[in-house]
Image (spheres, helix red, strand yellow):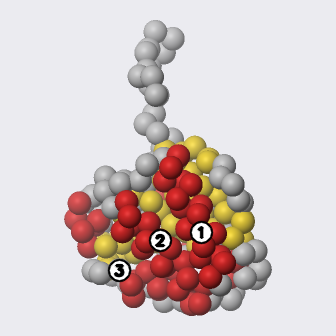
Amino acid sequence: MTTMKTELLDLLTELHERFPLDEEKILVIGCSASEVLGKTIGKAGSIDVAAEFIDAFLSLRDRTGVHLAFQGCEHINRALTVERRTQKQFGLTEVTVVPIRAAGGAMSEKAYEHLDTPCVVESIQADAGIDIGSTLIGMHLKPVAIPVRLSSKQLGEAYVTFAITRPKLIGGPRAHYPAK
């Protein structure tokens, strides 16, 4: 397990180097522990996998200040576990549920146990995201989402996709945009 935790930490560091994450940004996390183990999504959630990964995500938060949002599974309508300060800072709508492995997923359950003041919110518009095992985080990303290719596309047996967002470009042929 510690190998996967190290791989995740490396990928999160790589993402942060490409797209600086800080206290003004939200990172949405979708994670199928089942897929990490090579099983069908939603069928073999592993608290052990979630425990390894939560440490990596909390380490990133502690280093950068980024707000974390852990997407739950379809059984809780993909609601997100966040810190109370995130809910307040971004004006997010709280819902009443406690994620568990069978309804929310192992990662959301572990996040709820390990965040200082956890709460669950209905939806979010995150600045960046990581999708481990095709959990479909797109509904929780700001428009316009841009895929990011990092050095690895896998954690355990799960395919991993990273995304960042940018503001929409508006205007026509005469519009000008700031240089990056």
Q: Are marks 2 and 1 in contact (CB under 8 Å)?
A: yes
The amino acid marked with disc number 2 is Phe
Q: Which mark is residue 8?
A: 1
Q: Residue at x 28, y 66 (%)?
A: 87
Q: Residue at x 59, y 63 (%)?
A: 10
Please provide percent x and percent y for residue 128: 48, 53
**In the displayed structure, does residue 54 sit left or right of residue 134?**
left
SS category of the residue bearing label 3? loop
**In the displayed structure, does residue 131 sit left or right of residue 159?**
left
SS category of the residue bearing label 1? helix
Q: Nearer the viewer, residue 8 or 26?
A: 8
Please provide percent x and percent y for residue 33: 63, 80
The answer for how far apart the CA atoms under marks 1 and 3 are is 19 Å
The amino acid marked with disc number 3 is Leu
Q: Residue at x 45, y 33 (%)?
A: 168
Identify the residue under disc 3: 115
Identify the residue under disc 2: 57
The answer for how far apart the CA atoms under marks 3 and 2 are is 11 Å
Q: Earlier in the sequence, mark 2 or mark 1?
A: 1
Give above or below for 109 relative to 156: below
Q: Nearer the viewer, residue 99 or 111?
A: 111
Please provide percent x and percent y for residue 144: 51, 41
Q: Earlier in the sequence, mark 3 or mark 2?
A: 2
Q: Earlier in the sequence, mark 1 or mark 3?
A: 1
The answer for how far apart the CA atoms under marks 2 and 1 are is 8 Å
Q: Residue at x 72, y 66 (%)?
A: 154
Mark 1 Cα shell of 10 Å, populated few (<14), some (14-19), many (≥20): many
